Amino acid sequence: MKIPIEKYIRTKRARKETLLGIGFLLPSLIGVSIFVLIPFMDAIRRSFSETMTRKFVGFENYRVVFANEAFQLAAKNTGKFLLVCIPLLLVLSLTFSVLLYSVKRLQNVIKTTFLIPMVIPAASIVLLWKVFFDEYGLLNKIMIACGGTGTDWMNSNKAFLVLVFTYIWKNIGYDIILWLAGLNGISESIYEAASVDGAGSLQKFIYITIPNLMSTLFIVTVLSLINSFKVFREAYLIAGDYPHESIYMLQHVFNNWFTNLDIQKMCAGAVLVAIVLLGVIVLIQKLTRSDKEEIV
């Protein structure tokens, strides 16, 4: 049986486009494989063996990591930081993006203002934070001048609040841009049809805006999760290797293990973190996808 000429042409064109796409992706795939996948596979191998003798020890390194008090403290602080920061960042950025979406006139200027923290170097942020949050800094002087008492922000439990503020201040502009991209993808005709049916602003937000932002919600949440691990730079530059216990994060543990050449513990900890992150991302994807399917 002969294949129709039109179908043959479409098949050949589709095959050509597939090969062209693979050609464009191949350099990135090679780079990721060399600098990420292969080193990570080696880290998995090292997590089951001793560093010097390369003797297979099974799950002994994982047992040592779980029993390590520093790792327990860092995991608890990191989990607490994620549970506080990510929901707060998502709510604040979505609120600002919805408000900004309704202000068409100065939208570009306001977006640029929100993005300024992203281009400020981490070293400059650290100097700014020291000016504000040092024991003898500007914030304490203002509080004392107003009749209050000063506090040592970075050497008390309030250091956690400073770190949360730093993360939200630095990342809210990026998330606002992502939300705005999702909002711009929603057709105005849907809102107009809802207005004709008598829907109010809150109803349109719940039944139109939120369902159509599910894919954006997944992207924003995952990127916010990834960016949350970058806050270590500020915490490290401000407080050093051993900061106040409220901001002692997993990155501090890995940095100290690397300094002490505890490679087997570092590899086991990295594998554990990767597994948890992968599980969280898969869970977020299923939640956003299931919500969208129920609405449809």
Image (cartoon, rainbow, N blue to C red):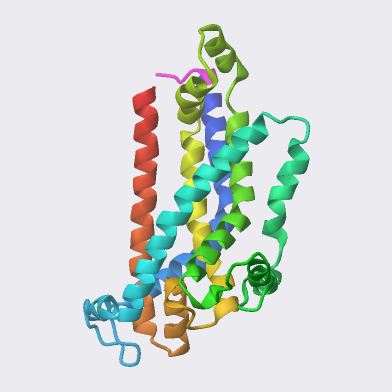
Residue drawn at the location 39% of the way across and 84% of the way down: 263
Residue 34 in view:
no
Number of numbered discs: 0
**Seen in the image, is 236 located left or right of residue 293?**
right
Residue drawn at the location 54% of the way across and 47% of the way down: 22
Q: Residue lying farthest front?
A: 147
Residue 245, percent from left and from top: 42, 77
Measured along the vertical axis of the image, is residue 139 above or below residue 83?
Answer: below
Magenta stretch bounds = 1-6
Of 106 and 131, nearer the camera is 131
Residue drawn at the location 74% of the way across and 30% of the way down: 104
Residue 65, percent from left and from top: 29, 78
**Seen in the image, is 220 located left or right of residue 58?**
right
User: Which part of the image, by quadrant, shows the C terminus?
Assistant: top left
Residue 141, percent from left and from top: 67, 72
Q: Residue lying farthest top?
A: 196
Q: Quadrant of residue 130?
A: bottom right
User: Which part of the image, by quadrant, shows the N terminus?
Assistant: top left
Measured along the vertical axis of the image, is residue 284 above or below residue 229?
Answer: above
Residue 154, percent from left and from top: 54, 75
Q: Main secondary structure of the magenta part?
A: loop
Of 175 and 126, nearer the camera is 126
Residue 210 in view:
yes
Of 112 and 155, nearer the camera is 155
Find out whether residue 147 is within the magenta segment.
no
Residue drawn at the location 45% of the way across and 28% of the way down: 211
Measured along the vertical axis of the image, is residue 131 above or below residue 119?
Answer: below
